[in-house]
Image (cartoon, grey):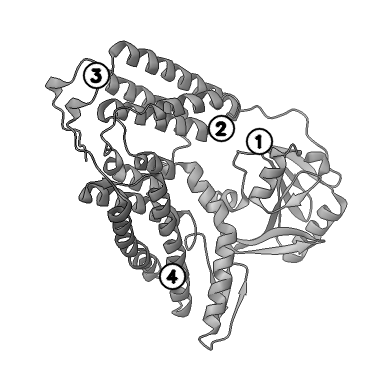
């Protein structure tokens, strides 16, 4: 395993430029992504702490140039698809190409670490955890019936004996899932260093798939323990139980399994002194990274302008509702019974304004989430709670022609040329009023002018 031990006395003039351009890329990230990067996120902090474990050259190969080319391709693509994840990944690739200037061909684990730290991955983990969480809840309910105690499941709520337990996002969401995957990456890095072997992409993918499956098992066991022993969220053991399950059912088995994989399929690491790696030519290095820095700076400016679109002057009128723009992508409609948000999705690769995230940002807590059907249309329903206040909400994806709950369904339809989708979110103070409003909206197609 190669460690950066080269003394400054043998570093040629190019290496002060490596540090300079590293600062340039970090500055672009700080300016262009200051409100995007989750600085205080547990997974972001964990990723930053463990990143040095993954940045090494175990193959003994010189600079691969793949990170630089990746940064250029994504930087150019961001003018076609101006979303912040494009800029984030391209800047990560640019920083890794800088590291390659010192260490040569660095491990793919470093790129995966940066990817799992990104807010886009955390967002996707939260969104796609909905169907997984509902499935886990249903399965846990069936297992609990085997104890002989009366139990039932409604959405993400398990009724066991005399109490209800809500399987919240922390039980099977972005927190434990991404934490497990990051820990899996660090375990791979440590065992590779210990045995002086490294895994190819296929081995890394298999290892992380195993970690993912173990995490599902750990979350299932955690749900069963919390429900069976009635360990409420306000109990300190609620979080402790999650950590114990993570350690026993994910980390310990991962250590054993990944060690076996590396022993069997690991490729012998090449130990070469860093001084023996080719030193990049100053002129070529300058040309490459000045061009890349200018490209990413322009990309940052362009994306910021595109994401700060002015609010349109014209407002689609909907009979029976008073409408107003909440921001450039969200229209708020209200009547005496309900509040309706039409949240436009800008593209197939864009993140939507998911109500589970938006309402949480407003201080509400989802007490339960379930699926319901209205005239053959599936919708998510939930109860929102903040203090003594309770609201009933529902949402689905709609483009005026088709309605769906499937994340992949609506993205695939848009890729095939379908009309863009929006999130329709209906909220009322009473469950009956909510259901009446949903029936009316779906049966009459009331909001087609706004979709």
Tell me the element at label 1.
loop
Q: Nearer the viewer, residue 274 or 361?
A: 274
* Image quadrant in which you'd find residue 281: top left
Q: Nearer the viewer, mark 3 or mark 4?
A: 3
41 left or right, relative to 267? right
**Whether label 2 touches label 1, CB < 8 Å:** yes
Q: Residue 240: where, in percent of width, then height? A: 35, 67
Residue 248 in sight here = yes
Q: Residues within 10 Å of mark 3 (few under 14, many from 20)?
A: few
Q: Residue at x 54, y 57 (%)?
A: 129
Where's the N terminus, which quadrant?
Answer: top left
The disc, 3 or 4, on the residue closer to the chain's N-terminal end is: 3
Residue ID for mark 3 = 16
Residue ID for mark 2 = 83
Residue ID for mark 4 = 222
Residue ID for mark 1 = 346
* Image quadrant in which you'd find residue 384: bottom right
């Amino acid at each position: 395993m190669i460690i950066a031990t080269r003394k400054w006395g043998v570093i040629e003039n190019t290496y002060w430029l490596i540090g300079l351009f590293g600062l340039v890329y970090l500055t672009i990230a700080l300016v262009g992504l200051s409100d995007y990067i989750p600085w205080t996120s547990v997974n972001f902090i964990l990723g930053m702490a463990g990143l040095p474990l993954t940045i090494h050259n175990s193959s003994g190969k010189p600079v691969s140039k793949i990170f630089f080319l990746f940064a250029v391709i994504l930087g150019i693509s961001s003018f076609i698809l101006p979303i912040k994840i494009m800029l984030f990944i391209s800047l990560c690739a640019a920083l890794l190409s800088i590291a390659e200037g010192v260490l040569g061909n660095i491990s793919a684990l470093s790129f995966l670490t940066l990817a799992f730290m990104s807010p886009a991955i955390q967002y996707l983990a939260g969104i796609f955890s909905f169907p997984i969480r509902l499935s886990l809840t249903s399965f846990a309910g069936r297992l609990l019936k085997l104890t002989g105690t009366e139990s039932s499941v409604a959405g993400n709520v398990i009724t066991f004996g005399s109490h209800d337990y809500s399987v919240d996002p922390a039980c099977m969401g972005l927190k434990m899932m991404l934490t497990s995957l990051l820990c899996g990456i660090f375990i791979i890095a440590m065992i590779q260093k210990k045995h002086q072997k490294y895994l190819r992409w296929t081995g890394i993918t298999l290892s992380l798939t195993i970690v993912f499956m173990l995490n599902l098992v750990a979350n299932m066991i955690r749900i069963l323990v919390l429900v069976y022993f009635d360990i409420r969220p306000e109990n300190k053991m609620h979080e402790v139980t999650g950590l114990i399950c993570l350690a026993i059912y994910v980390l310990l088995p991962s250590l054993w399994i990944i060690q076996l994989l590396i022993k069997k399929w690991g490729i012998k690491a090449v130990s070469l002194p860093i001084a023996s790696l080719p030193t990049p030519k100053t002129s070529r290095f300058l040309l490459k990274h000045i061009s890349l820095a200018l490209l990413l700076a322009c990309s940052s400016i362009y994306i910021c302008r595109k994401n700060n679109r002015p609010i349109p002057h014209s407002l689609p009128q909907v009979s029976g509702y008073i409408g107003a723009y909440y921001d450039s992508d969200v229209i708020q409609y209200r009547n005496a019974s309900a509040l309706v948000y039409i949240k436009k999705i800008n593209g197939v690769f864009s993140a939507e304004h998911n109500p589970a995230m938006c309402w949480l940002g407003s201080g509400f807590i989802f007490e339960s989430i379930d699926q319901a059907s209205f005239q053959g249309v599936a919708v998510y329903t939930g109860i929102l709670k903040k203090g003594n206040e309770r609201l009933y909400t529902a949402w689905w994806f709609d483009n005026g022609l088709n309605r769906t709950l499937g994340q992949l369904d609506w993205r695939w339809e848009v890729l095939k040329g379908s009309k863009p989708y929006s999130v329709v979110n209906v909220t009322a103070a009473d469950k009956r009023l909510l259901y009446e409003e949903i029936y009316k909206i779906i049966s009459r197609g009331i909001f087609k002018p706004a979709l």
